[in-house]
Image (cartoon, rainbow, N blue to C red):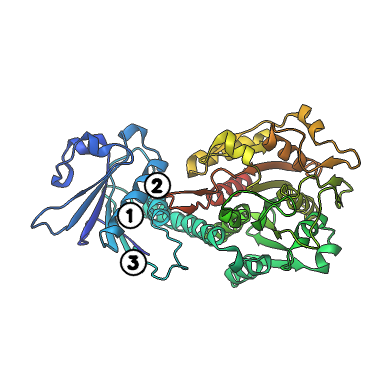
Amino acid sequence: MEWRIESDSPLGCHIVLLTPEFAAGSPLGLPVSERHAKKGTVTPFFRNGDEVRLWLTAGIGPEGEVQPEHIRQAMGEAGRMALKEGWEEVAVHLPELPLPADALGRAVVEGLVLGTYRFDRYRSDPQTQRLRRVDVLRGTRESESLFAGIRRGEADAAGTCLARDLANEPANHLRPDLLASRVQEHFSGTPVEVSVYGGVKLERMDLQGLTAVGKGSRYGPRLIEMRYTGDSSKPLIALVGKGVTFDSGGISLKTQRDISDMRMDMAGAAAVIGALDVIAKLRLPVHVVGMVPAAENLPGAHSMLPGDIIRYANGTTVQVANTDAEGRLILADGLILAGKRGARTVIDIATLTGACAAALGPKIAGVFGDEGLRKLLQEVGEEVGDRVWPMPLVEEYESLLDSDYADLKNISEGPYAGAITAALFLKRFVPTGVAWAHIDMAGPMDTPKAKGYLPAGATGFGVRLLAEAVNRLASA
């Protein structure tokens, strides 16, 4: 997609971001009113004899209340309508808003690119129409700042689309080894160094949880490690993403009628991969390592069984009470390994519990861990649109993980506090002295229908959140 900053544009389709204040002045001679400026409202206008064939007004609400998220939502809706009407080149009119030019440009790009994303490579008649050129009409804004925002938005959107592609991919096209190959191919020739470990190497690295979870599949597990060194003097930050490329539940088999979305049980891994992509594209001065323990959780002759014992590298023993609580078993390996690599801060992200999705719904992820990291992630999430809500780690609930013959079990007693006890389980594997946060993104993993800048399918949640959080942590 080609982006231009112009003072005027000859293109035939124009998108107008509309506030009630802008609407009151009848902008560009359009017959608009306050109702057209309501958030989420996109209205087409056609005028005979006009050089502009189609005008699309996209409401963003009152001028003083507009946030970048409102612009992203409006641009996503307007972009899809422009494509539906057959336009591949559009111009965007920006009203005067109390937002920095770079934040405005970034939001416009993210909304338009992410809102028009499609995953249709397996359809017999995939749509070939794509937005190919966008003219951003700068108004009174300084071009250099607006251009910087556009470049940041391009990087954010590219990393998020990468995560969406990976999470949407059917399991038979993304086994653990294929995921590793995709990551190696994607980062070839970039500043990101990729190492992949499998087979006996996993045993030598003492990654017992990953090995146990992957035993049931003929496609063996992998540990994918991605390292980016933009500034080696900065403390190492580790991002750990759950990479279960398909989760059948294992021996504790899932019973739902359609579990196709369990191919997305690696959306946490996709978020980490996408975040590394953003960081590398922007050449951020950070020091970060991404860890993706990848496995299929399937029943088979060699599968781990309920009642099995896993002894981790830190000496902790775990009773596998339920094989469908496998995500925490592989994340535990990632947390231990992050400590061995010298990370001073670790953030893990996973589609971990239905309990968190039930508590917070499909729009917000839960964040557990150190208070400072929780506050930072909540602040960043509000800004970039990947919203998280701080959740408690209730020490009194630790006894719910007690085992009769191991240090702890991988599920809790009873139906309560499942997201909290899962986080408490992970806490047992956080190295001493390391700052830690855990993001449970089971709710916002995907969406059933297109709205705003989220198309149906995987959302790419967490990419922009992690990339910006790493940037701020390194700058602190």
Q: Secondary structure at mark 3?
A: loop
Q: Can residue 369 be seen in the rendering of this structure?
A: no
Give the residue at mark 3.
129
Q: Residue at x 67, y 30 (%)?
A: 392
Give the left or right position of residue 238, taking residue 119 as reference. right
What percent of the width, then of the height, locates residue 420? 70, 35
Give the residue at mark 2.
451
Q: Which mark is residue 79?
A: 1
Q: Amino acid at mark 2?
A: Lys
Q: Secondary structure at mark 1?
A: helix
What percent of the width, then of the height, locates residue 173? 59, 68
The crowding category of the residue bearing disc 1, from other C-alpha atoms within 10 Å (few below 14, some 14 to 19, many at least 20), is many
Q: Nearer the viewer, residue 189 or 410?
A: 410
Q: Nearer the viewer, residue 354 or 28?
A: 354
The mark lying in front, picked from 2 and 1, is 2
Q: Amino acid at mark 1?
A: Gly
CB contact under 8 Å: marks 2 and 1: no
Q: Residue at x 35, y 37 (%)?
A: 98
Give the left or right position of residue 284, taking residue 457 as reference. right
